[in-house]
Image (tube, rainbow, N blue to C red):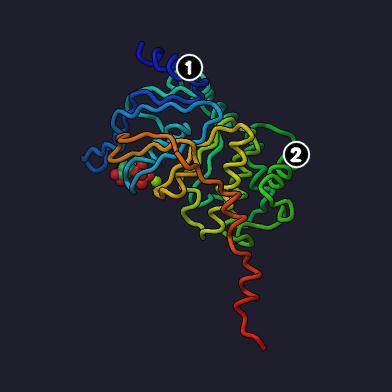
Amino acid sequence: MAAGDKRSDASSDGEAVLEVDHVSKAYELEGVTVHALSDVSLQVRRGEMVSIMGPSGSGKSTLMHIIGLLDHPTSGQVVIEGEDVGRLTPNQLAQLRNRRIGFVFQAFNLLPRTSALANVELPLVYSGVSGANRARLAREALERVGLGNRLGHSSNQLSGGQQQRVAIARALVTEPSIVLADEPTGNLDSRSGIEVMAILQQLNAEGITVVLVTHDPNVARHAQRVVEIADGRIVREEPVKDRRSAADELANLPNAARVAAEEAPAT
Ligand SMILES: Nc1ncnc2c1ncn2[C@@H]1O[C@H](COP(=O)(O)OP(=O)(O)O)[C@@H](O)[C@H]1O
Ligand SMILES: [Mg+2]
């Protein structure tokens, strides 16, 4: 079987944690068929960081939703952690998603008027973790993204960058092996965007597989490999030569407080 051959190819260079094999997705909308994905095949090795780059409407989110088990392909196969997800019951799918996959969205998707801690606890409610353990795990996840001092703040009391870090903590709290981030810096100013990329690179350095969607080539270059998609097809795939380090970029940014002081008129 073709999928079996591909699996052995991937394992020569490290185990494939996720495989997309000849996946197509068509949407029917008012009698018109939209081919959002056409015959897409992709393998991601455990511990890899991959960027999926392409213009608006090219099928990036559709692919992420299929990889993230939020949507089904029209045809083709998806294998996650060795499981052919097409064979799983809805219950098993939900379990695989909850235990293995963390999702970060462009628009954060936090519950409004709800504390950072409660937002991060939510996935643990679904996986049946007890109340005291939920609070501890959520606090640890928020500390990991540098928000240990914002546990009680609700979404509207946090900046966009902080909200996205809460969303990353929520993705992390179940200790997933894969984090999927769909345009995670799309709604952020450049400094907050680099901070978010630094966290994603740190998680990757700790062994989490990261798949990142972006239309920005500079953001894409924080990964080890860039996969380009256009009109629902993979058109190019190559390793990143000069991988960017968001931590270095942050260290080289001018210190905001110092710049403000230097720009203030002398009295
Ligand atoms: N639920 C849907 N119903 C109909 N068409 C959709 C739906 N979701 C996405 N599409 C279409 O599929 C194509 C790919 O969309 P999407 O995956 O969101 O692209 P991207 O994330 O790269 O901007 C677009 O033409 C879009 O209009
Ligand atoms: Mg999109």
Residue at the spot x=21%, y=40% of the render? 31
Residue 203 placed where, x, y %?
61, 39
Give the crowd class for mark 2: few <14, some 14-19, many >=20 residues within 10 Å. Answer: few
Dividing the picture into quarters, in which one does residue 62 lie? top left
Image position of 164 with respect to 82: above or below? below
Query: Mark 2 = which residue?
Result: 131
In the rendered structure, find residue 173 and report the number of the disc placed on it.
Answer: none
Query: Mark 1 = which residue?
Result: 12
Q: Secondary structure at mark 1?
A: loop
Between label 1 and label 2, give the one nearer the viewer: 1
Dividing the picture into quarters, in which one does residue 234 lie? top left
Residue found at the far right of this picture: 132
At label 1, the amino acid type is Ser
Residue at the spot x=53%, y=23% of the render? 92
Give the crowd class for mark 1: few <14, some 14-19, many >=20 residues within 10 Å. Answer: few
At label 2, the amino acid type is Gly
